[in-house]
Structure formats: structure tokens, C-alpha cells
Image (cartoon, rainbow, N blue to C red):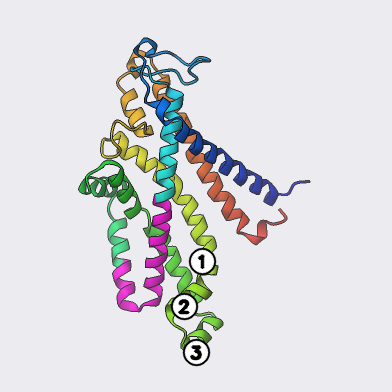
């Protein structure tokens, strides 16, 4: 009989395979997603066009998968950089003295005190919007919570016997962090990295929908949803419903993957 740990592992593998397939398929469909055919515009879903076509005759299935692929790639890059920032600042706050700790804690409190979507829009707008604006905005607005967790973990590790022995032997702090602390922090970093994914994807779609993100030429989910708003009252429900549903499924899979990692990292779940 399959225990909960094995079921969780299978769920995690399914999420990885599904999301990898979306990413690869979206990259392959980028050219098809931009093809226009005004003789095929506003067609409902059928066998030829699984998600129908839009007001320019573009295939909505190709545009949706391509947009999700772009969102996943942006989420991957921004989550990776945010995790790295959280690790560096969280470790620095815990190991470099009270002055550095107070400064980094103040920065975390300041950024977390600003409404998240507002901070994201301000950063994206300040650096010129577009792809780089989205990239920098999401990266600089998603590291704070994980940095706090890393800071707390490092402070606990500093009281460990082997860390104190290494300090008394004169081992450099950077070497202690690399050799003795990083292996203990890897589970938290991996889980934090995965859980940052859905936030990055949703916020990329949100600011693009509001006009502060990716350019209209790119087949992004936010752009697809923004364009569909003008046609919903005409009965073209598939322009928003199907891309929106795929976005929800993708975000839920990321959440499930993150929860699966949490369970796999918990020894108590091994035989449940």
C-alpha cells in the first residue's frame, strides 16, 4: 500500500512534468501564437482551435500556452534571484553584527509596509516597464519573508556547538556559512524558492493586465486577459475563461509542489 510520502512524491513529480511540458510547448508555439488570420476571428472552441480564436484570428490555445511558458520562465528567474537575495541578506543580518541586522531589518519592515502590488508597480514603472521592469520589480519585492526565515535559522545555528568551535578556531564567517550553515539552510531555500513561483506568476500577470508590465506584442497571460475584457459583453467568453483557468491550474500546481516539498522535508511524514 502506497504511503503518504510516496503519494506526495508522485504529486511533486507530476507537477514538475506538467509545468515543464507547458514551458517547452510554449516556447515551441511562440511563432504560431502571433499568427493572424482575420477570416478565422472570434471562433468558439472546436477541434481545430481548442481554445477558440481572438479578434485577430490568433489561436488562443497557442497564445495561452505561450503566455504561460513566458510567465513560468519569468517566475523561475525572479524566484531564483529573490531566493539568492534572501539568503545573502538574511545571513548577513544574523552574522555581521547588530548594526547590519538593524539596517536589514529596517529595510525589510519598510518594504513590507508598502502594499505589495503598489511596490511592484512603482519599481516596474521606475525602471521603464517592459520585460526588465517586470523582472526587476518582482525580484525586488519578493525576498523579504524568506530573508526573515533565513535570518532566524542562522541565528539558531550560531548557538550550535560545532559552529562555536569553528569560530574559536578562527574559521572565517564566510567559510562557516558555506560549509556548516548552507547545508542546513538548503531545505528552507528550496521550499521558499518553489513557493515564490506562484506569487511571481500572479504578480507578473497582474501588473501586465494593469498596463505596467510586458509589452502588448508579447503573448503574455496578463495581456490576453486585458484584451479579452472588451469582448466579454459580446459573448466571447472563451477569450478570458480558458486562459484564466489555465493560469489558475498552473498556480495551484506550484502551490501543490511547494506543499509536497514541505511534507517530504518533514521526517514525521515518512510513514503516514
Instruction: Give the residue number, with chain letter if any, for mark 2.
Output: 175
Relative to 97, residue 262 above or below = above
Name the quadrant containing residue 16.
top right
Badge 2: how crowded within 10 Å, few (<14), some, or many (20+)?
few
Residue 34: x and y in percent read 37, 26
What label does residue 255 carry, if any?
none
* Image position, residue 179 (x, y; %): 52, 74
| Mark found first going from the N terminus, 2 or 3 | 3
**Residue linked to disc 3:** 169
Which numbered disc, 1 or 2, marks the residue closer to the eye? 2
Number of the label disc, if any, that sits on residue 185:
1
Please, what secondary structure does the residue beneath circle 1 have? helix
Residue extent of the magenta highlight: 78-105
Q: Which residue is situated farthest in the top direction here?
A: 39
Q: Secondary structure at mark 2?
A: helix
Q: Nearer the viewer, mark 1 or mark 3?
A: 3
Residue 64 in the magenta stretch? The answer is no
Amino acid at each position: 500500500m502506497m504511503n503518504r510520502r510516496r503519494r506526495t512524491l508522485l504529486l511533486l513529480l507530476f507537477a514538475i512534468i506538467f509545468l515543464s511540458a507547458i514551458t517547452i510547448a510554449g516556447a515551441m508555439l511562440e511563432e504560431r501564437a502571433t499568427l493572424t488570420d482575420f477570416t478565422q476571428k472570434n471562433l468558439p472552441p472546436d477541434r481545430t482551435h481548442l481554445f477558440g480564436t481572438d479578434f485577430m484570428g490568433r489561436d488562443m490555445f497557442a497564445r495561452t500556452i505561450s503566455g504561460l511558458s513566458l510567465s513560468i520562465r519569468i517566475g523561475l528567474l525572479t524566484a531564483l534571484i529573490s531566493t539568492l537575495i534572501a539568503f545573502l541578506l538574511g545571513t548577513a543580518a544574523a552574522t555581521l553584527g547588530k548594526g547590519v541586522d538593524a539596517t536589514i531589518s529596517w529595510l525589510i519592515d519598510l518594504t513590507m509596509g508598502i502594499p505589495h502590488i503598489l511596490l511592484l508597480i512603482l519599481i516596474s514603472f521606475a525602471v521603464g516597464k517592459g520585460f526588465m521592469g517586470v523582472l526587476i520589480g518582482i525580484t525586488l519585492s519578493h525576498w523579504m519573508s524568506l530573508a526573515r526565515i533565513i535570518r532566524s535559522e542562522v541565528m539558531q545555528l550560531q548557538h550550535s556547538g560545532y559552529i562555536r568551535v569553528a569560530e574559536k578556531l578562527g574559521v572565517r564567517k564566510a567559510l562557516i556559512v558555506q560549509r556548516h550553515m548552507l547545508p542546513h539552510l538548503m531545505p528552507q531555500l528550496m521550499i521558499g524558492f518553489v513557493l515564490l513561483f506562484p506569487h511571481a506568476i500572479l504578480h507578473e500577470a497582474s501588473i501586465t493586465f494593469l498596463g505596467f508590465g510586458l509589452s502588448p506584442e508579447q503573448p503574455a497571460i496578463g495581456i490576453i486577459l486585458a484584451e479579452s475584457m472588451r469582448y466579454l459583453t459580446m459573448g466571447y467568453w472563451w477569450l478570458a475563461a480558458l486562459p484564466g483557468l489555465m493560469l489558475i491550474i498552473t498556480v495551484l500546481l506550484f502551490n501543490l509542489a511547494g506543499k509536497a516539498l514541505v511534507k517530504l522535508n518533514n521526517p514525521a511524514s515518512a510513514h503516514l
